[in-house]
Image (cartoon, rainbow, N blue to C red):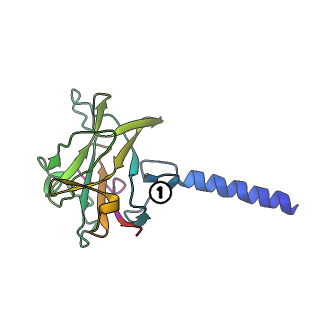
Amino acid sequence: MKTLLLTLALGLGAFSLTHAQEISTKNILIRQGNTTIEINQKTQNITLKPERFSLEFLNKPYQERQELFYSAKALLTDNSQFSNTYESMSFDDIAFFSPGTGFAATFDENQFFPNLSEDGHQYLYYASNSDHRINKIGKQREWDIYQWNLDGVTIDGNEIAWKNYRIGELYLYFVVDRNLNNSIDSDEHHLIRISFQK
C-alpha cells in the first residue's frame, strides 16, 4: 500500500511539474540547458548560469500585407531602479517602446547579443523562414511557439557574453501585444530580474 501511495504521489508530482511549465498566453518560459523556469508573475526574480538562455512565448506570425503586426518587444537594461509601471499605457507613450526606437539588429540563429539600452527595445517578430528575428519552434492550438535566444548583450558596440557580463543584474522587460491594441494589457508583460551565478 505504501509503495502504491508513493508511486501515485511521485506521478502526481511529475504531472504538476510538467503542467506548471506549460506555455500559455499568461506566461513565458526561460530555458537554459535542462532547466525550465516559468515566468508567471508581472515581476519575477530568477538566477541563471552565465551562459546562453532562451525565452519561449506564444504569438502569431507577423503579417505585413494584412497589417497584423504581431511581435514582441524587449527592453534590456542594467538600471536597478527600473520598475514594472507601464500597464495600460500605449506603446506610443513609452519612450523606449515608441515608434523608431526598435533596434533593427540582424538575426543570427547561432548567436544573439541584443543591445543593453534604456532608450530602445528589441523588436522581435516572425514573418517567414527568411524574414524573422526569433525562431518558430512549434504550435499550440491557434498560437505559434517562438523562441528568442540570448548569448549576451551588446554594450557600446561590443558583444559581451554572459560569462563576461560584470555589471550585476540584468532587467528584461518583455511585452507581447497579442491583441494588437498597441498598449500593454495586464497579461501581456513581465519584468524579469536576472542574477547570474558567480
Residue 153 located within the stretch drawn in magenta: no
- Most extreme residue toward the left is 100
Q: Quick check: 128 above or below 112?
A: above
In which quadrant will I find the N terminus? Answer: bottom right
Residue 191 located within the stretch drawn in magenta: yes
What residue is drawn where x is 47% and y is 57%?
38
User: Chief secondary structure of the magenta span?
Assistant: loop
Q: Which is more toward the observer, 119 or 26? A: 119
Residue 141's spot in the image, x, y percent? 48, 35
What residue is drawn where x is 39% and y is 56%?
51
- Most extreme residue toward the right is 1
Query: Which quadrant of the structure image shows residue 124?
Result: top left
Amino acid type of disc 1?
Glu
- Most extreme residue toward the front is 164
Q: Which is more toward the observer, 114 or 13? A: 114
Left or right of residue 22: residue 135: left
* Region of the chain picked out in magenta, as a range: 181-193
Q: Residues within 10 Å of mark 1 (few under 14, many from 20)?
A: some
- Most extreme residue toward the bottom is 81
